[in-house]
Image: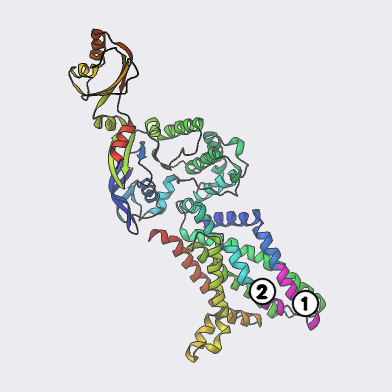
Amino acid sequence: MNNILSIFRKELKSYFNSPVAYIVITVFLLISGWFFSTNFFLMGQATVRTALSVIPLIFIFFIPAITMRSIAEEKKSGTIELLVTMPTKDMDIILGKFLAGLVLLTIAIMFTLTYALTASMLGNLDGGPTFGGYLGLLLMGSIYLSIGLFASSMTENQITAFIISFLIIFVFFMLDKVLIFVPGPLVSSFEYLSVDYHFNSLLRGVIDTRDIIYFISMTAFMLVLAGRSLESRKW
Amino acid sequence: MIKVSKLTKNYDETVAVDNISFEVKHGEILGFLGPNGAGKTTTMKVLTCFMPPTSGDVTIAGMNVMEDSLSIRQQIGYLPEQNPLYQDMDVVDYLRFVAELRGIPKEQHDSRLRRMMDVCGLEKVISRSIGELSKGYRQRVGLAQAMIHDPQILILDEPTSGLDPNQIVEIRNLIKEIGKEKTVILSTHILSEVQATCDRAIIIDQGKIVADGTLQDLQAAFHGMERITIEIKAPQNGCAEKLRTIENVKQVNEGTPDGEIKCFTIEIEKGQDLREQIFDLTVKEGWKLLELHREVTTLEDVFRQLTKG
């Protein structure tokens, strides 16, 4: 546990010591803010739903950018050798890095709470969907972060890591959008695996344990994959 | 302390380390010598639990690298080849980070850090970013990292590479100092390093151990032949024949003469010293002796004999 925290602190510091965190957060806020504000005043509804439903799209680019460096860079510079020869479990390294990414993501998402604040000042903001939406963003972000870590652990090239995680995330994103092309018996499993399907149900303001379990188990699965991939030097 | 038996490590098809066995006792400084690509680094990576062996057993302090990896790693300080470091961290932050991962209790961090600053001479750069440091200072940071938890075993992969001569001497002294109570394994392809620091050397080539012993043992075992080079000033020819008449001379090679000055390389039986006889001969013949030099087998000769081809 202490090791996870040490790695977490170090990773978080290195995000904020370099321009990465600031650039990523700024770009994220610019895009999401634009989507929030363009329609907001036209629709005349006090809702953040449009903004929240656009953010998953931004995540597809945004999260691989956060995670691409985390393990690939260590492999390239050789510091991974130091890290894994410390009395630390490989999984602790993954978890520490995951938590740091999650905190960075949470900070970025927190800034968008200003949209909700604006909306609530102008009208009666519907609490349920807003809360569900934000929770959904965090949970969805967790899955994407763990996918990003997995991709980053497979290569020592950051660009490759970015592209691999982008592709995997894109597949998960597209699963429920290609349902019309999917043979009937498979539809429900495609739907169940799709991140967006579960996110949309949270966005409706329904906090269903089935969705929560989906998000948590997918994240855990991807983190374990990342851990296995880091251990692959031992195979 | 460390026991390696029948260790083999393959990378896909290539055999990096081929069935090697050796032991290292507590308080011993072992030099791991070999040309580049001989398998030194691979062996170290197995010892530090970075990768498991393909086959064979490695026991460190009575524990197996495969089964008790975590507790073994606790006792090892490791400086990997190329000394990888986090470029964007400050020296002090980095050392604290390592101290945390090493599981040093928080209240001891400051004292350990201070000790490392003294030992490795890091006072001037402690709050600088690692990326800004010169190679010598980076190497010291790497060493500080390896020693911060006062490990029983120190594994150093080419610890003095990239240092200037003064720093090399400092680091060697440091290693010798540590080696008084700790077990140290260091790899190098610089022979003088082994001569200067190690109690014992293992020479490894193409994944196999070709020699193992104290420096004296190694030199003695590979004495082969001794050589004497002389330079004389003599008007007449046929000096070589006269030199060959001395007892125990095996061979005399004549260098290109420069006027009356001639030079010879005389190979003699092992363990003989013929300098006096040669001097007597030159006096008898009336040659003027300009130079007389006896070459003793160095570790370099041993190394080249064992690892060439």
Q: Residues within 10 Å of mark 1 (few under 14, many from 20)?
A: few
Q: Nearer the viewer, residue B255 or B299?
A: B255
Instruction: Look at discs 1 and 2 and give the one toward the viewer.
Output: 1
Give me the residue at 32% from left, 49% from top: B59
Coloring applied to the structure: rainbow
The answer to which quarter of the image holds residue B27 is top left
- Give the residue at x 57% y 63%: A67
Residue pointed to by mark 2: A55
Question: In which chain is the residue bearing label 2?
Answer: A
Q: Which residue is mark 1?
A: A38
Query: For the view shown, which residue lies furthest in the bottom direction?
Result: A184
Instruction: Judge whether residue A33 is colored magenta.
Output: yes
Q: Main secondary structure of the magenta part?
A: helix
CA separation, marks 1 and 2? 14 Å
Q: In the rendered view of the protein, which quadrant contains the C terminus of chain B?
A: top left
Where in the figure is residue B203, as x and y percent of width and height? 32, 40
Query: Which kind of residue does numbered mark 1 sit on?
Result: Thr
Residue B174, position as x, y percentages in the image? 46, 33
- Mark 1 lies on a secondary structure that is helix
Q: Earlier in the sequence, mark 1 or mark 2?
A: 1
Q: Which residues are magenta?
A: A29-54
- Residue A179 percent location from the top left of the image: 55, 87
Instruction: Tell me whether the residue at label 1 lies in contact with that at label 2, contact meaning CB atoms closer than 8 angstroms.
Output: no
Lateral position of residue B291 relative to residue A229, left or right: left
Nearest to the observer: residue A219 or residue B227 = B227
Figure check: B219 above or below A169: above
A173 shown above or below A27: below
Q: Residue type at mark 2: give it.
A: Ile
